[in-house]
Structures are given as C-alpha cells and as structure tokens.
Image: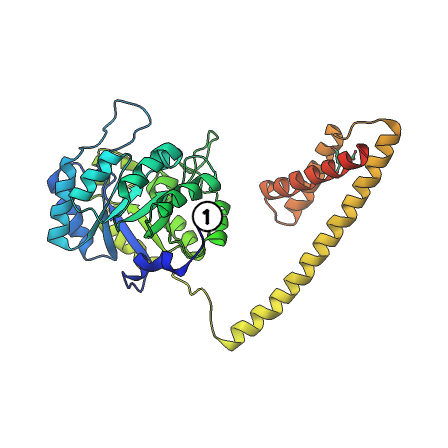
Amino acid sequence: MENSPKLRGWLNRFNLNHPLVIAGPCSAETEDQVLKIAHQLKDTDTSVLRAGIWKPRTRPGNFEGVGALGLKWLQKAKEETGLMTTTEVANPIHVDLALKHDVDILWIGARTTVSPFMIQEIAEALKGTSKTVLIKNPVNPDLALWLGAVERFYKQGIENLGVIHRGFSTYNKSVYRNIPEWQIPIDLQNEFPDLPLILDPSHIAGKRDLIFELCQTALDLNYDGIMVETHYDPDKAWSDAKQQITPKTLEELTQDLKVRKRVSSNEDFNYQLKKLRTKIDKMDEQLVDVLGERMQVADAIGKVKKEHNVAILQPERWQEVLRRMIKIGSENGFEEEFIMQIYKAIHQESIARQQKVLNR
Ligand SMILES: O=C(O)C(=O)C[C@]1(C(=O)O)C=C[C@@H](O)C=C1
C-alpha cells in the first residue's frame, strides 16, 4: 500500500471547514437513549453518530452491548437526524448485520486490530463494498501491526480507510487509561500523510477532564478529526461512565478548540521561520558532531578495555553519568524522562561501538 491523496477521498466528501467529529454513546443502551443523544448532537459539529452495539469488555460479567437490536436504533437515528452512523465490528457476522442496517462507517476495535486472523476475516467480509473502515490502533504500541491491519483492508479493495488513535495499554500507573505514545501516530503520518487520522480522546483519557487537552494536542499534530463518547447523562451510562461527556460539553469543546493552519503564505512568517530553521539546522549539525566525538572516545575506551580484558558495561559509571546528566538537565529545565531517553540511546550506541572494537 502506498500513500495517495485518494485515501482522503471519503473525508473530503464531508466538505467540512472544521475537523471531523464523530460522537455518541459508548454503548447503545435503549432506543430512547440513542435517539435522544442523536437529536442533541444534530446541531453540533458532529457528522457521524457512534454507538457500540457489541462491547468487548476486559472481564466477563459487565454489560456486553445490546447486540443487533441496537442497529435498528442507529438506523432510525440516521433517518430522523441525517447523521451518518458508525459502530464497531469484530467478526464477519457483525459486518453482515451492520451492512444490512446500512451503517455508514465501520470501526475496528483495538482488541481486534491485534489479530491478523480476525482482520483478514473482516476484510474479506467487506470485499466489494464501498464502506469506510476506521482502524483503531492495536492495544500494544506496534505501528507495523496497526498498518498491517490497514493494508489487509486495502488489499481487499477497500479504499475508504482511516485510523483512530485510542492509546496503548500500560501496566504502569499513568494519568491516562491508555497512554497516548504520540510518536507512533507521528510515525504513521510520516509514512501515510494522506491516511485520515482521528483521535479517540475518551479511551486515552478514561476520564472527562483530560479530553479537551488531548483534542487540542491532536489538532496541533494535524489530526483530521475526533471521536468522542457522548451521553446526555454520562454518570448513568451503562459502560465507560467516567469518560463520557454531554453533547452540550462537546459543543463547547469544539468551539474552544483552536484549529491551526498547516502552513501560511504570510511573508513575514515564512521569513522568520526560515531564519529559525537555519539556526536549528546548524545546532543539529553541532549536536551530531559532538555525538560523533563522544563515540570516538567510546571507541578509545573499548580499545583500552580490550587490552585489559575489561567488560563493556560498567553499571556504576553508567549510573553516575545518568545521575549527573539528569541533574544538569533539570537545571536547564528538562524533564528526567527526556534526559533518560536520550542517554539510554547514547549509552546503547556507545556499547554497540565498543562491541565492534572488542570483537575486532
Ligand atoms: O565509562 C565507560 O566504561 C564506558 O564504557 C563509557 C560508557 C558511556 O558511554 O558513558 C559506556 C558504557 C558503560 O556502561 C559506561 C559508560
């Protein structure tokens, strides 16, 4: 699969002057609930009504969705409000039922994206249709697996594709329910700049108060839209109550979001940007030059270690380097995490260089 402006076709057809908004309840609960939410969303920026019909729950015993019955409610909501509809499908039976009920956009959940077997089955079930398919990232931070799923749909002739960033599972404590790992969607955009990218802030946040800032970050990273869980009475929602917001809050949120231009033709802006980028280019060269010099010292250390038969990894020294640089880093306003990431990479390269010297 290659990047192509054609990938944006389905999104361009919405003809929006703002990011695409997909909204609706985590789960369809009752006909009244779906219709009420759809009507409340009708006059917001929302173009597509979402609702989970089959809910993949981590542990059994929780509400698992109303099943096919809910598809009729979505269909009715579409007739009454003109909103397009979308739901999650996780197997060919779901696909068949969703197609029969004229669901416009199908999304693939994070737990399904991890399985190439399931993706293949779903992609084959959709062959020959012109449906739009949005693929959520897999639960684990694996860009190749995510893109692999997209490619499986593309290979079945499905060209209306997009991806949804919903964050990644972590065992570590975090303010997020699923950590964003923004670098992964940034890498994805590098490979497929025209593949529509949508943020699901609800599943990343796990709670309401982080949703706005996540959406703003996404727009600042050139995302094409947001998919937000919305309920008229979020606290009483049958699933994911903590992360849902009301349609009214969604409306305020979309009004407050700053949509910035990707580029500007303003001459002064371009002049200033060019000047600053020249400075960055120069500093990047200096950084790499200094790194090169550091590696030459590592080579020399490798040489003396070889002569005296001493091991490459020196945990105490490594701890000392790290501690010192974290301290200097914090004096310069850098987070510990940032310094750790850089120094771990430098240390690894230094070890690799010494390995070459010692094995020569
Ligand atoms: O000081 C050493 O012994 C080195 O090999 C250098 C260095 C480093 O790059 O800073 C690399 C490996 C060791 O684990 C500790 C430090």
Q: Residue furthest top?
A: 61
> Is 251 on the left-hand or right-hand side of 188?
left
Front-lying residue, 97 or 312:
97
Front-lying residue, 116 or 114:
116
- Residue 344: quadrant of the picture: top right
Task: Rate crowding at label 1 as few (under 14), some (14 to 19) or many (20 or more) other CA atoms within 10 Å.
Answer: many
The residue sitting at 50% across, 53% down in the picture is 190
Q: Residue furthest bottom?
A: 267
Which quadrant is home to the C terminus?
Answer: top right
- Residue 176: quadrant of the picture: top left
Above or below for 165 versus 170: below
* The image quadrant in which ligand 1 is located: top right
The residue sitting at 81% across, 43% down in the picture is 297
* Callout 1 amino acid: Pro
User: In x, y percent, where is residue 137?
Assistant: 40, 41
Front-lying residue, 226 or 272:
226
Q: Is mark 1 within 8 Å of ligand 1?
A: no
> Is 246 on the left-hand or right-hand side of 155?
left
User: In x, y percent, where is residue 118?
Assistant: 34, 33
Q: Is residue 349 visible?
A: yes
Label tally: 1
Q: Coloring scheme of the render?
A: rainbow
Q: Residue furthest right?
A: 307
User: In x, y percent, where is residue 236?
Assistant: 21, 35
User: In x, y percent, where is residue 228?
Assistant: 30, 47
Q: Is residue 199 visible?
A: no
The residue sitting at 29% across, 31% down in the picture is 56
Query: Which element carries disc 1, helix, strand or loop?
Result: helix
Residue under label 1:
185
